[in-house]
Structures are given as C-alpha cells and as structure tokens.
Image: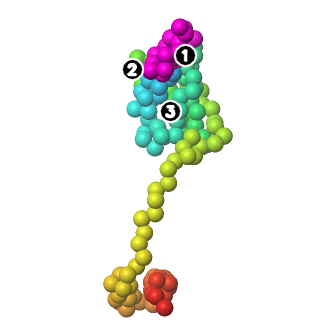
Amino acid sequence: MNRFSQPDRHPMQWLTANEQSSDLIMAAHRLLALEKHLKKCLPATLAQQVAVTAYEDNTLTLLIYHAAPAAKLRQMTSTLCQAMLRGGWNIKKIEIRMGTEPKFAHQETMERQARPLDADDLSHFEALQTQLEPGRLSDAIQALIKRHRPD
C-alpha cells in the first residue's frame, strides 16, 4: 500500500512521510518563526510590509515592495540583528530585496455601506446650509441636496 492510497490521512502527515518534504516543512516553519519574531521587533506599519524569504549562513533575506519602507529598514539592520540575536536567532547580516508587485494586492475590499438620503436627512442638510456663510462648503451642501432630492 502506498501513501496515496490512504485518502483519510491529514496533508501534514503526507508531507512529513518522506525526508524531502519533511525538510521543506521544517524550513517553512523556521522561516515563519523568523518572520514572526522579526515583526515583533519592527514598527507595526513596517512589519506589515516585510516578508522573510531566506535564512542561510547567518544572513536573513527580507522582501519588501516599496522604496521608502526599504530605506527605513536598511537604517534599522544593525538594530534588528541585535534584537534577533537577543531572541535566539544568530543573524549577522540582513539583506533587503525589492519585490515587483505588492504582497497585499489581493486584499478584500469592504462592501460599501451607503444608504440613500431620506427626506429627514435632506432637511438636516438644508438647515445646516442656511446657517453657513456663502462659500465652497455651502456650495457643496447645495449640490448634495440637489443631487439627492427626488424630482
């Protein structure tokens, strides 16, 4: 009986069944652990934009997609190496690679939560507009009322 004839086996059991895929799983877990610790050492906005791609010969390779955060990350490399060393990772050097497309390009878009303005809403805007001095805000509110008023 081979390993493919057991459909009820969990995929992780199948992946750890031979040495090659077992090594792959171990490397992936190591990179994920490295990335998790690295992101704890970074400011939140920068942590969202960084991915760990390799760790070989005490060199950590990071992937980032935009130049400005990459420049900030380059300024922090020595501090990050020290922080990673304190966390138990023997990292002597950090390389930063630029990616070609954003990692988060496929984010879910939020559904628009708008409702049409009813007569009560429009009356409030009309009251607000009468209290305003003539200007751009007053003109914008007038245009809003005109656009939403049923003909």
> Any magenta on residue 48?
no
Q: Mark 2 — residue?
A: 86
Q: State whether residue 108 is above or below residue 23.
A: below
Residue type at numbered disc 1? Phe
> Any magenta on residue 24?
yes
Proximity of marks 2 and 3: CB atoms separated by less than 8 Å? no
Query: What residue do we see at 64% from left, 42% from top?
Result: 101
Q: Position of residue 17 (x, y in %)?
A: 50, 11
Q: Earlier in the sequence, mark 1 or mark 2?
A: 1
Label 3: how many Cα within 10 Å (few below 14, some 14–19, many 20+): few
Residue at disc 1, secondary structure: helix
Q: CA distance from mark 3 to mark 1?
A: 48 Å
Q: Mark 3 — residue?
A: 76
Q: Earlier in the sequence, mark 3 or mark 1?
A: 1
Label 1: how many Cα within 10 Å (few below 14, some 14–19, many 20+): few
Q: Nearer the viewer, mark 1 or mark 2?
A: 1
Query: What residue do we see at 42% from left, 41% from top?
Result: 44
Q: Position of residue 28 (x, y in %)?
A: 51, 21
Q: CA distance from mark 1 to mark 2?
A: 44 Å
Q: CA distance from mark 2 to mark 3?
A: 15 Å
Give the camera-side residue of 18 and 53. Answer: 18
Residue type at numbered disc 2? Arg
Give the camera-side residue of 31 and 44. Answer: 31
Does residue 113 show up? yes
Residue type at numbered disc 3? Met
Give the camera-side residue of 94 and 75. Answer: 94
Q: Mark 1 — residue?
A: 4
Residue at disc 3, secondary structure: loop
Which region of the structure is painted magenta?
1-27
Q: Earlier in the sequence, mark 2 or mark 3?
A: 3
Q: How many marks?
A: 3
